[in-house]
Image: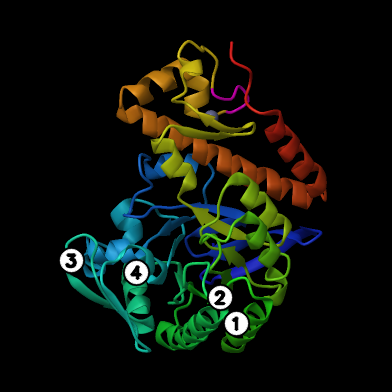
C-alpha cells in the first residue's frame, strides 16, 4: 500500500500500454475499464459483485450526486466509499458534461454554469471551484477538472472557443484542487476532431501539469471512424508517464481500438445499461435475449464465460425473466456484461505484456465476425 498516487508502465506493444495506477485505496491495473456508478450504485449490482467481475475502480457522477443526495450529506455520512460500500478507488467526473446533457435551463459564463436540476427544477451553480469542492466532499480518489464540451457536429469556431474556456477552467481547477496527497487531478483535452485544436489543448494542459490526462469531447456523436481518427494522434500529444483516460467509451470494439492507440482508462454505462434492456455483450458480439429464438434454448449465453448468468442459467431462462420483467433479468445480464468487459480488459493487458496484441485483436474480430451460435 502507498500513501501517494502514482502510475507506472510495465510493458508496451506498438502504441498500446499496460501498467498500474497505485492509490492509497488500491491498485488499478491498466488498461482499465471503469463501470459507472451514477447514483452511488452500479445499477442492479452489489459492490462486492462488481469487484468479483474484476473491476479495480468505479466512476461516480458529480452532477447526479450533488443533486441527490447532496455532496455535504455524503461527506457527513463518511464519504462516497463508505456511503456506497466500495472501498477501492473511485473516479468522479466534474459534472460539466452532464450539466450540458441533462440539466434544464442553463446559463454559461466565464465564471461557470448556472442550471436547474432535472430532478426537481432547483437552481444550482457549477464552476471549477465548486466542482473541486464537491469532488473533495465525495472523497473521490481521481478528480476530473471542470470542463465544457459542445455536442458534435459543432462549428470549429465554437469548438475552439469552448476548448479555450475549458483550458482556463483547467487552470482554475488545478488552483482550487490544492495539495491533496494520495488524490489525483486529471486535466481534460478538448478540441473536437480538429488536430490543431487538440494540440493547443494538450500544450495548455501540460503547461498546467496534471497527475493524469483525459481525452474528452469524443463519443459524443462523431462516429467510430472519426473517434479513432483523433485517437491516432491525440494520446501521443500527452505525457507518456501519466495515465490517459478516454471518457465515455464505449462498445467492445471501441475499447479495443482505443487500447491499441495508447489509452489506459475508459468508462461507459453501456454494459450495465444494456443489461437492463435485454442486450448481452459476448465474445461473439451482441445477443438480444428478447429474441424468440432463445425461448427453448437450454444452452448458456456463452459456454466459455464463468459469470453466474452463464454458469447457472440457460438462454431460455434469461429470455423468460426478461419477458416477465423480473428484476433478476437485469441483475444477471449486467453481471455477465461487466464480467465480459473485465475479461476483455484482462485479455488486452495480458496480450500487451506478452507482445501479442495484434494476434489478440485479430482473434477478437474473427470471433465477432463469426456471430452468435446458430439457433437450435
Ligand atoms: Zn457470462
In the image shown, does 213 or 47 lie closer to the viewer?
213
Q: Which residues are magenta?
A: 301-305
Which residue, given by chain and number where applicable, does mark 3 sit on? 121
Label total for image: 4
Q: Can residue 177 be seen by looking at this rendering?
A: yes
Secondary structure beneath label 4: helix
Please give the residue where the numbered disc 4 appears in the rendered image.
Answer: 99
Q: Is residue 18 above or below residue 189?
A: above
Q: Mark 2: which secondary structure?
A: loop
The first of marks 4 and 3 along the sequence is 4
Q: If you read the primary sequence from the N terminus, does the residue marked by circle 4 or circle 1 appear first?
A: 4
Label 3, label 2: how far apart the Cα atoms are: 29 Å
Lower position in the chain sequence, tag 3 or tag 2: 3
Q: Earlier in the sequence, mark 2 or mark 1?
A: 2
The alpha-carbon separation of the residues under discs 4 and 2 comes to 17 Å
To which residue does mark 2 refer?
A: 190
What is the number of the mark on residue 201? Answer: 1
Corner quadrant of residue 39: bottom left
- Find out whether the residues at labels 4 and 1 contact each other: C-beta distance under 8 Å: no
- Magenta residues, dominant SS class: loop
Ligand 1: does it lie within 8 Å of the C-beta at label 3? no
- Within 10 Å of disc 4 (Cα), the crowding (few <14, some 14-19, many 20+) is many
Q: Is residue 326 above or below residue 87?
A: above
Q: CA distance from mark 4 to mark 3?
A: 13 Å
Q: Are marks 4 and 3 in contact (CB under 8 Å)?
A: no
Q: Are marks 3 and 1 in contact (CB under 8 Å)?
A: no
- Residue 181 within the magenta-colored segment of the rendering: no
Q: Is residue 302 magenta?
A: yes
Amino acid at each position: 500500500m502507498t500513501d501517494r498516487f502514482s502510475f507506472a508502465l510495465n510493458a508496451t506493444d506498438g502504441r498500446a500500454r499496460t501498467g498500474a495506477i497505485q492509490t492509497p485505496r488500491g491498485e488499478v491495473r491498466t488498461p482499465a475499464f471503469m463501470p459507472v456508478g451514477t447514483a452511488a450504485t452500479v445499477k442492479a449490482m452489489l459492490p462486492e459483485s462488481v469487484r468479483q467481475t474484476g473491476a479495480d475502480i468505479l466512476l461516480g457522477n458529480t452532477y447526479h450526486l450533488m443533486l441527490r443526495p447532496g455532496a455535504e450529506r455524503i461527506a457527513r455520512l463518511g464519504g462516497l466509499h463508505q456511503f456506497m460500500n466500495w472501498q477501492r478507488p473511485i473516479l468522479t467526473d466534474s459534472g460539466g458534461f452532464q450539466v450540458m446533457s441533462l440539466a434544464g435551463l442553463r446559463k454559461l459564463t466565464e465564471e461557470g454554469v448556472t442550471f436547474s436540476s432535472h430532478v426537481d427544477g432547483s437552481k444550482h451553480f457549477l464552476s471549477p471551484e465548486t466542482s473541486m469542492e464537491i469532488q473533495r466532499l465525495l472523497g473521490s480518489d481521481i478528480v476530473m477538472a471542470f470542463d465544457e464540451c459542445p455536442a458534435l457536429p459543432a462549428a470549429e469556431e465554437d469548438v475552439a472557443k469552448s476548448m479555450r474556456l475549458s483550458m482556463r477552467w483547467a487552470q482554475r481547477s488545478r488552483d482550487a484542487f490544492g495539495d491533496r496527497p494520495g488524490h489525483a487531478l486529471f486535466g481534460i483535452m478538448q478540441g473536437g476532431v480538429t488536430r490543431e485544436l487538440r494540440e493547443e489543448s494538450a500544450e495548455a494542459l501540460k503547461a498546467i501539469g496534471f497527475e493524469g490526462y483525459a481525452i474528452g469531447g469524443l463519443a459524443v456523436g462523431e462516429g467510430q471512424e472519426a473517434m479513432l481518427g483523433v485517437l491516432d494522434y491525440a494520446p501521443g500529444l500527452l505525457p507518456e508517464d501519466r495515465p490517459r483516460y478516454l471518457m465515455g467509451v464505449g462498445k467492445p470494439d471501441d475499447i479495443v481500438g482505443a487500447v491499441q492507440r495508447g489509452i489506459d482508462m475508459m468508462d461507459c454505462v453501456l454494459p450495465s445499461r444494456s443489461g437492463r434492456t435485454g442486450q448481452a455483450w459476448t465474445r461473439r458480439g451482441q445477443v438480444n435475449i428478447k429474441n424468440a429464438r432463445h425461448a427453448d434454448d437450454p444452452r448458456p449465453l456463452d459456454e466459455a464465460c464463468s459469470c453466474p448468468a452463464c454458469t447457472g442459467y440457460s438462454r431460455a431462462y434469461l429470455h423468460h425473466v426478461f419477458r416477465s420483467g423480473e428484476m433478476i433479468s437485469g441483475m444477471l445480464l449486467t453481471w455477465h456484461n461487466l464480467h465480459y468487459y473485465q475479461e476483455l480488459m484482462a485479455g488486452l493487458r495480458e496480450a500487451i505484456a506478452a507482445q501479442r496484441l495484434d494476434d489478440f485483436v485479430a482473434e477478437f474480430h474473427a470471433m465477432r465476425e463469426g456471430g452468435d451460435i446458430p439457433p437450435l
